[in-house]
């Protein structure tokens, strides 16, 4: 499994439309509008690392209104829920 967090800068009048177009792309799990240096954050998850090369530069970066992307590759996932499940003995 290959996961990435994509930081996306969008023209201010196209944020909603770009977010909707991005979330409809295959492999894009979630899109968040955020405050800060970027406008949107997309979570991309694919079975194969090579798919990221198709989804991000050939998909997300080409959505109308997107002016820049920065991709953060995920190496390992940490989850509080997973940690709690590891210690759950099934006793209510």
Image (cartoon, rainbow, N blue to C red):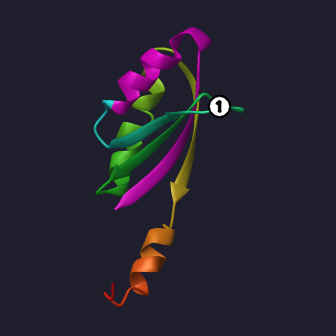
Q: Residue at x 39, y 85 (%)?
A: 88
Q: Is residue 32 above or below residue 16?
A: below
Q: Helix, strand or loop at disc 1?
A: loop
Pick the residue in front: 58 or 78: 78
Pick the residue in front: 62 or 85: 85
Q: Quadrant of residue 18?
A: top left
Pick the residue in front: 55 or 38: 38
The quarter of the picture where the C terminus appears is bottom left
The quarter of the picture where the N terminus appears is bottom left
Q: Residue at x 51, y 12 (%)?
A: 14
Q: Residue at x 31, y 87 (%)?
A: 90
Q: Quadrant of residue 33?
A: top right
User: Seen from this angle, which residue lies furthest top?
Assistant: 13
Q: Position of residue 77 (x, y in %)?
A: 48, 67
Q: Position of residue 5 (x, y in %)?
A: 51, 47
User: Seen from this angle, which residue lies furthest right?
Assistant: 37
Q: Residue at x 36, y 32 (%)?
A: 23
Mark 1 surroundings: few (<14), some (14-19) or many (≥20) residues within 10 A:
some
Q: Is residue 22 magenta?
A: yes
User: Seen from this angle, which residue lies furthest front?
Assistant: 92
Q: Which residue is mark 1?
A: 38
Q: Position of residue 31 (x, y in %)?
A: 45, 36
Q: Is residue 78 magenta?
A: no
Range drawn in magenta: 1-23
Q: Position of residue 63 (x, y in %)?
A: 43, 21
Query: For this view, does 86 lie left or right of residue 11?
Result: left
Q: How many marks?
A: 1
Q: Is residue 72 above or below residue 14?
A: below
């Amino acid at each position: 499994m290959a996961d990435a967090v994509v930081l996306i800068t969008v023209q201010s009048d196209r944020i909603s439309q770009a977010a909707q177009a991005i979330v409809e792309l295959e492999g894009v799990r979630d899109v968040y509008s955020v405050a800060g240096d970027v406008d949107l954050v997309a979570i991309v998850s694919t079975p194969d690392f090579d798919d990221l090369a198709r989804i991000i530069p050939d998909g997300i970066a080409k959505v109308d209104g997107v002016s820049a992307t920065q991709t953060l590759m995920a190496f390992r996932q940490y989850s509080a829920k997973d940690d709690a499940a590891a210690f759950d003995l099934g006793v209510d």
